[in-house]
Image: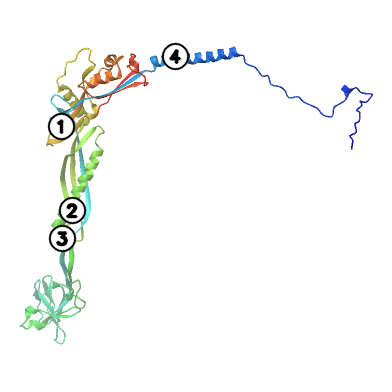
Amino acid sequence: MPEKISDIYYPKDRLPSELEPEFEFKKEPQENVLIPKTGSSKRRIFSLWFLGVLLLFIIAVLSYFLLPKAQIEIWPATQNLSFKEIIEINTQLEKPDFVLKVFPGKKLELELEKSQEFSASGKTLQGAKAKGVIQLYNSYSTANQVLVANTRFISADGKLFRSLKRVIIPGGQHDEKGKLIPGSLDVEVVAAENGEEYNIDPSTFSIPGFAGTPKYTAFYGKSSLIMSGGFKGEAPQVTKADLDQAKNSLSEALFTEGRASLRNQVPSDFILIDDVYQEKIIEISSGAEALEAVSNFNFKIKGTLRAMAFKQSDLEKFSKEFIFANMPEEETFSSESFWKERKIQEESLKLNYRIYSLDWEKDKMSLELDFSVKVYRDIDVPTLKRAIFSKSLKEVEISLASQPEVKRVDVKFWPFWVSKAPQNSDKIKIKLNID
């Protein structure tokens, strides 16, 4: 079908510019594009390159003058010096005398007391005799009858008893019909032996001493109560070994506790040798004696403990001064040498002491003092720094390692490109290492 073309007309009452378009077209903003110029670019690159070279030059110059450092560690050769001297500790002294080798000491003393209960280890056969009362009758006559102590009485079953004391049995009396009424008396008796078999029931008793006479049947006894208290068996008993053991163990405990208490009284700057004690027992008491039949007994002991202490610092000071006074003869060095006098390594000082003699009456003791220390040759650091100015690392190593007073040396330069020691002494660090 053929297309139909229509003409477009503007309204007569409006101009084309006044008509509002149905669509709004926006133009994208265009960026400003700079087209570099060839001559300007070359100049910029050259400037950057120049600045970089200049910066590197400045860094190199600063590194050369500011960064170079040298660190030198030296292990000097050490010599061990040992000495042995007899010194005296005197509690009456106030100040040390290094010439006479006498030092003040401190006397310590304690009074001690301790008690403890112990068990008996022994055994013994133990028993008791039965006891009771017999009523004795005198039907022989009206006359009194004397019976001595330990008079024998035999029970109906043949058990023997004895009277405890002398008695008088009153005589009998006649009644109205003329019949003799026996006189009587209560008598305490005890069995002849230990044992339960004598705890007999009421019985009749005869007096064997009257056997064969008319009195044998006229004098007799009767008991109305049982005999009691008789027994025989094994019982604990204190032995001499028990008492000795109690003394030894209690003494050991007493002085062990005393030594611990004494050590707590020692001032912090004093030394107390463990062997320097005087232990003395002044009183012993026991609640039982040897062979006594008891199961337990109490043991008590009193004693004194003495000791002498001294200052460790006094001995250390004496040792150092003694070592200085007995140093090996010094070698002669030139005025330009960086070596100085010998020096003591403080940490290497060792002291050992043993008891040589003790006099508790005079409160003094002698010690055998062994002491040793390491000595080394000291270094004059400023002189050594001047001696290595501008020297190479190898020169410094060889120069120091060849010294007889040097055991080992370690030389380091920094940064890595530095070939000579700096001339600024502040840039050289020297460290002594003592083995």
Q: Which residue is mark 3?
A: 292
Relative to residue 405, is residue 134 depicted above or below?
Answer: below
Q: Secondary structure at mark 2?
A: helix
Relative depth, front residue between 180 and 207? 207
Q: Separation of disc 4 and disc 1 at Cα? A: 68 Å
Relative to residue 122, is residue 341 depicted above or below?
Answer: above
Q: Is residue 66 left or right of residue 239?
A: right
Q: Which mark is residue 248?
A: none
Asked if marks 4 and 2 touch (Cβ < 8 Å), the reply is no
Q: Which mark is residue 246?
A: 2
Q: Is residue 426 left or right of residue 219?
A: right
Q: Residue at x 34, y 14 (%)?
A: 424
Closer to the chain start, of discs 2 and 1, is: 2
For discs 3 and 1, the disc positioned in front in the rendered view: 1
- Is residue 104 at all visible to an observer of this figure? yes
Relative depth, front residue between 179 and 250? 250
Q: Secondary structure at mark 1?
A: strand
> What x and y, as percent, mark residue 404?
19, 22
Q: Which residue is mark 4?
A: 57
Residue type, numbered disc 4: Phe
Q: Quadrant of residue 422?
A: top left
Q: Residue at x 60, y 14 (%)?
A: 38
